[in-house]
Amino acid sequence: MSEYVAPLKDMQFVLDELVDMDSIRQLPECEEISTDLVEAILDEAGKFASGVLSPLNIVGDKEGVRWQPEGVTTATGWQDAYNQFVAGGWNAISCEPEYGGQGVPRVISTLVEEMWNSANVSFTLCPMLTRGAIESIELRGSDALKQAYLPKLISGEWTGTMNLTEPQAGSDLAAIRSRAVPKADGSYSVHGQKIFITYGEHDLAENIIHLVLARTPEAPEGVKGISLFVVPKFLVKADGSLGARNDVHCVSVEHKLGIHASPTCVMAFGDSEGATGYLVGEENRGIEYMFIMMNAARFSVGLEGVGLAERAYQRATAYARDRVQCPEAGVKGSGKVAIIRHPDVRRMLMLMKSQTEAMRALACVVGSAIDHAQRAPDSTIREQNQAFVDLMIPIVKGWSTENAINIASLGVQVHGGMGFIEETGAAQYLRDARITSIYEGTTGIQANDLIGRKIAREGGKTIGLVITRMREVLQQLQQSTAEPLAAIAKALAAAIEALERAVAFIVASYGKDVRAALVGAVPFLQLFGTVSGGWLLAQGALAAQRKLEAGSDDQAFLQAKIVTARFYADHVLSQAPGLAYTVVEGAAGALAIEDEQL
Amino acid sequence: MSEYVAPLKDMQFVLDELVDMDSIRQLPECEEISTDLVEAILDEAGKFASGVLSPLNIVGDKEGVRWQPEGVTTATGWQDAYNQFVAGGWNAISCEPEYGGQGVPRVISTLVEEMWNSANVSFTLCPMLTRGAIESIELRGSDALKQAYLPKLISGEWTGTMNLTEPQAGSDLAAIRSRAVPKADGSYSVHGQKIFITYGEHDLAENIIHLVLARTPEAPEGVKGISLFVVPKFLVKADGSLGARNDVHCVSVEHKLGIHASPTCVMAFGDSEGATGYLVGEENRGIEYMFIMMNAARFSVGLEGVGLAERAYQRATAYARDRVQCPEAGVKGSGKVAIIRHPDVRRMLMLMKSQTEAMRALACVVGSAIDHAQRAPDSTIREQNQAFVDLMIPIVKGWSTENAINIASLGVQVHGGMGFIEETGAAQYLRDARITSIYEGTTGIQANDLIGRKIAREGGKTIGLVITRMREVLQQLQQSTAEPLAAIAKALAAAIEALERAVAFIVASYGKDVRAALVGAVPFLQLFGTVSGGWLLAQGALAAQRKLEAGSDDQAFLQAKIVTARFYADHVLSQAPGLAYTVVEGAAGALAIEDEQL
């Protein structure tokens, strides 16, 4: 059974050719992020991922977590791995230095996070949720809340959770019923039940800080009456030491298809005297705060998709190199060969590889835009980058996770019958990946956000700018005489036209017939992701071609980048016109059916 | 938790409008298959599926099977269900009446088998494998073997298995090493290990008849040196009673992603004195016999795809009717509505519904061709139908199972977070479906068979005839003035052209550059399946339109058939040109990559 190996070479290629690292280094507090430092961070992270997190992945899947009334026990080795993770300073690499973070640019932590997810997505959920709690408190917490909670959340001594969902309120946050009643001392008494709370209870850290959505007594109905509270598992005394156990308890954990080692908890707040909570920011603005933070969480779930896809690809490739079956087609007198030589197996591996590299490239490009949006001194640059980030996050989330499910499923297929046997490990990636297109907003929710808030509302302005960037790459491709680049250009040209048709349809129809536009939302998300991936792989192929022409001695790798972009063009990008057809033509069939006939 | 309900109305529609039941009734021994009898069979089968098999599905998934040295115990209720299944005569409905079967036409048992698979695919594997053993013995067994084994296999008192795979010989049957040494009494002593043996050991029946591939001492190497043997668990005495325990044992069962209740056994033949086996037909022709029978098994696995897709659709629809979340888009002042009203949920349900109906239609059309191929008095008709069956079985198998995986995954998605919780039941269909594109020949194997033996070898003759039939339907559509039919015609016309381009490429390139053709094999299979489904749904829409125009009082159902075909045209059939692009252009990217760069 092979362990994960970080794809450092492709990661470095993305940083060198698709991200403008020089402009990142010119951002405030990023001056020290030298090439050497980046290399050292990625190298160390790769070692930690392979050496510590990856071996625990199957252990966690098999053992799962154990619930008892007094708490939840994580799998063998989990505690030790978490201690090492925290001691290595990994919990805080992209957090604000003010409270102990290391302020590493997001584009770099994007790659580090991909590694954690490749190695062990169940583990990675814990620091991911902690980061969500940190960001909520950083964003709108009072100084007192910041002082009390941020240092220990950033160090990893404590972990955090996000408590949104209730049984009747999944995607529909307006339906939240949990209550928070003000107390004389300025704190609140919180009551209610939350479900699907990731790492809501565990034994890895001495305190757990719950961020909880609830309604105050006089709050208006709907989303405008929801406030955000900090509810610690143990109350924190003035001196920072732990006080009484708060009235918040994990009453059960779910039995899930995947991510077995990540406790998914039902949390009861205030079953006895009421759970003590502290308001974050102002009353009734909880959803607003949550949405700002949710973008970060959605980006992180997209990275789960990238990480799982890479891991599934690595395992399938290792198996395909190893497994000998049948002679090679078209080779007279061939003996039996490793299945990596069989055309259909190559097709599957290339589908996995090319899409994973496309997803990684997009995540890094968006990661670097996050850095510019947060740190650029010029507000216009910040705004432009934020608009790009807002547009692309539904793609990083929705497209990468839907792809990851298909890629993990292909990984099972490459293994044949062995893929269906749990001990092989390939099936776990499929089971784990299956949640990623659901939590933090389903693909449907991402797609509705994309076409409504991110495209129709501004008449397609930001996506128009992205398409302009795509056309610049296309033009360069069309000027090249190299055969593979011409093939890529052919598919990319048709794909960009298809994307433009679909954008025009959405902009024109959203206001007039929103239901018709919404039928095409997910196909549009898939289309935009597909073309975005093709754009960045094409840009990579151009860079590889330039380096080859300049006499680079890394021929095999650079040729592979070109071939991979070409494969993607012919097998993935080529599906863009069909997706655009569905976006433009597809409403009638879905809307004309009577409910009773479904 | 909803139980399965047989989709009798759509099944009847397929029989009435897409299958020529009159011509079936004119076949020898089919005269008695009246409309009433068919209705009664389907009705009773539906009741058995809902009442007996469906409730055991989750039980079996949870409990799995228990292995002990003395044998394998199936899940609670399994034994009783199997007894009822046998007592009801279901085991033998399509078997030869000569040995106790009921000779029901395949087109009807196709629908019955779909029901069993919808209700409980793990259970259904047992009679499916028994049928495989029956067919092997019917096909080439001596009279003595027939007399000794067929009656009890057909009645279901005994069950059968197929023992092909060995650890080093999965898809590559040429690599089989099991040995069979002739004994003085004409029987053989069989030695070897077989893996992935479905129902290789269990407690449902008093004897298990293994059909085993093995080599005789002087056999040539490769596939031409493999013979087929009957190896019973208990030897059968001359009077038909059970004799000594044979030297064949289940040494372990696999821990699998899905079909938990179906024991997947490692079988040891001849660990002590040698397992007594009886040759079927002639020595060294085992692979040939197995391939004839494998067509039937592949068809049956395709029906697992249809059945699982239907079941996943039913559960998702039930949930979508029930689950209330968010107001309806585009409806001012709408209260919260069931999610079935949300455009993206409708899209997902329609994707599930339309593809499932397309798969069912194709399976029945092929099922009826099997009847004509086996029973038509005119040999030309038999041959034409057999050629059609041979062409389409890779589609029924490969396309239906790949679709089933995606449909089951969509079913999880419709449930949101609840879909990821095992108790909901939606995830089981995904886990169960995941094996169907692997066993009885992976999709890659199906696709290679399709483009090589079924298309290129005969220069595309049979598929050309199918395309002619598609064009006839297209022409009728184009003559219609009804708007949805025109929309279907538009997508179908482009899809047929795409299919023709891809066929021309395969016929031209297979002999010249087989590796290039093979890269496109699976995309071609997907393309051909997609267009076949569109063709039959379009034919159904035409029939529905005719009935509506003739004043049928079943308006809602018939309208839904038209809307469903239209949805499929815009969302599925519209992807055909992209798939054809991949078939024609896609080789270079997959073949140019160096193994080391994967």
Image (cartoon, coloured by chain):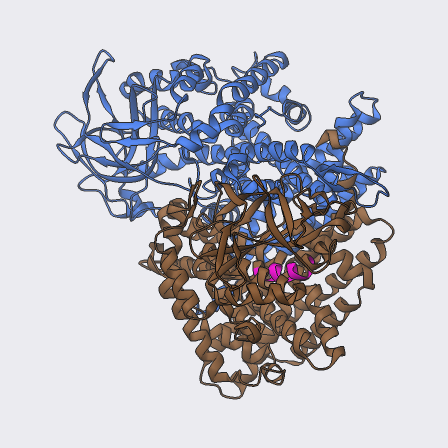
Chain colours: A blue, B brown
Q: Nearer the viewer, residue A471 or A338?
A: A338
Q: Nearer the viewer, residue B554 or B487?
A: B554
Q: Quadrant of the N terminus of chain B?
A: bottom left
The majority secondary structure of the magenta stretch comes to: helix
Left or right of A107 in this view: B74: left
Q: Position of residue B181 (x, y in %)?
A: 68, 46
Q: Which stretch is magenta?
A: B291-300
Which quadrant is the C terminus of chain B positioned in?
Answer: top right
Query: Quadrant of the rendered structure where residue B290 is?
Result: bottom right
The residue lying at 42 percent from left, 75 percent from top is: B43
Residue B299 located within the stretch drawn in magenta = yes
Report x, y in % for residue A452.
48, 49
Tell me the quarter of the picture where residue A17 sits: top right
The x, y position of residue B192, in whole percent, is 62, 42
Identify the residue at horizontal 64%, vertical 19% (top origin). A22
Q: Is residue A184 left or right of residue B368?
A: left
Tell whether position B485 is magenta: no
